[in-house]
Image (spheres, rainbow, N blue to C red):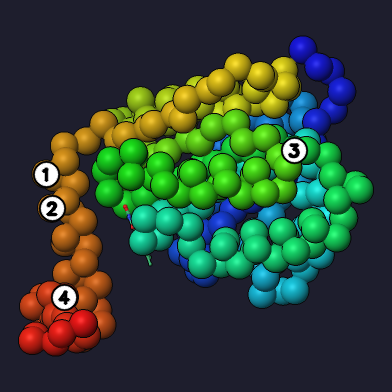
Amino acid sequence: MNLETKRIVLVNSSPKLTEESTSGLLNNLAAKQIKTAGLEIYRINVRQSLFQGKTENDFEAMLDADAMVLTFPLYVFCLPGILMRFLQDYYTFWLKQQDRVKNARVYAIVNCGFPEARINLEAVRVIQCFSRKINSIFRFGVMIGGGGMLQGAKDTPFMRKTFSQLENAFQLTMDDILNCGQAVMDNIMITMNFPKKLYFFMGNRGWYSTAKKNGLKRKDLYRKPYFQENVNL
Ligand SMILES: Cc1cc2nc3c(=O)[nH]c(=O)nc-3n(C[C@H](O)[C@H](O)[C@H](O)COP(=O)(O)O)c2cc1C
């Protein structure tokens, strides 16, 4: 084991403004394990970084990092726009600082609304490409399906198994950072231990009540305002 203190940058990229996010919860769990492992930690909230204009300090921390852990929700089967912006800006910053580059190790933790963890794969591959661009070492992704349940049902007994899988995944990440792991690693997939039909039923109810709160009827959810029949493209 390499005993030199490692500096980890933990990035939360949920665009959510007020509600608690699943990415925030995942980051808190990871942070606990990073601290227990005796590693140094620097936390970034992408939304705050961009909107409070403090990207420069955060980019400096990323440049000095031994490892970066990027946590984000899946948006339209890819990365949220604010994370794309942030990574593009970091790349511009990085291009001017290449003499100081440390070749950090990169990990992605992605959670999505659909129950299938594998649909996060394309987003993980985007992070893999980004890592290559900044001469960093992409290691693996932790892909989580049904992410909303982590927040919504975190205290229920049937979620214990999922939380223990998450703990194992983060432990593996810490060990990989500490040991400078070289072996090829597969992405880790974590799916909720919950019946799919019931999950969709509850999800739909959520949409209906949100529609009601916004003065809409159930059928309004199925409207296609931009769809025009008989249009030749
Ligand atoms: C604009 C938007 C796009 C989304 N796109 C997808 C998607 O393509 N696939 C999916 O499974 N979930 C999608 N979701 C659901 C989120 O990934 C899910 O709610 C996630 O748990 C939110 O994580 P957070 O709390 O960390 O922001 C989307 C949510 C929003 C708001």
Q: In the drawing, what numbered circle is on residue 201?
A: 2
Q: Are marks 2 and 1 in contact (CB under 8 Å)?
A: yes
Asked if the residue under mark 1 is in contact with the one under mark 4, i.e. CB atoms within 8 Å, the reply is no
Which label's residue is closer to the chain start, 3 or 1?
A: 3
The answer to whether residue 23 shows anywhere in this view is: no
Residue plotted at (21% across, 67% down): 207
Q: Position of residue 191 (x, y in %)?
A: 32, 34
Provide the residue designation for mark 4: 221
Residue of label 3? 104
CA gap, disc 3 to disc 4? 44 Å
Quadrant of image for the N terminus: top right
Q: Amino acid at mark 1?
A: Lys
Circles 2, 4 touching at the beta carbon (< 8 Å): no
Q: Which mark is residue 197?
A: 1
Of residues 224 and 145, the one drawn nearer to the viewer in this rendering? 224
Q: Amino acid at mark 4?
A: Leu
Instruction: Where is residue 36? Give x, y as percent.
Output: 70, 26
Give the mark nearest the N terminus, 3 or 4: 3
Q: CA distance from mark 3 to mark 2?
A: 42 Å
User: Residue 51 lies in what quarter of the image?
Assistant: bottom right
Tell me the residue at 64%/59% (across/down).
87
Mark 3 or 4: in front is 3
Q: Earlier in the sequence, mark 2 or mark 4?
A: 2
Vertical placement of residue 38 versus 112, above or below: above
Cβ atoms at labels 3 and 2 below 8 Å apart: no
Calculate the distance from the C-alpha at mark 2 to the C-alpha at mark 1.
6 Å
Asked whether mark 4 and ligand 1 are closer than 8 Å, the reply comes as: no
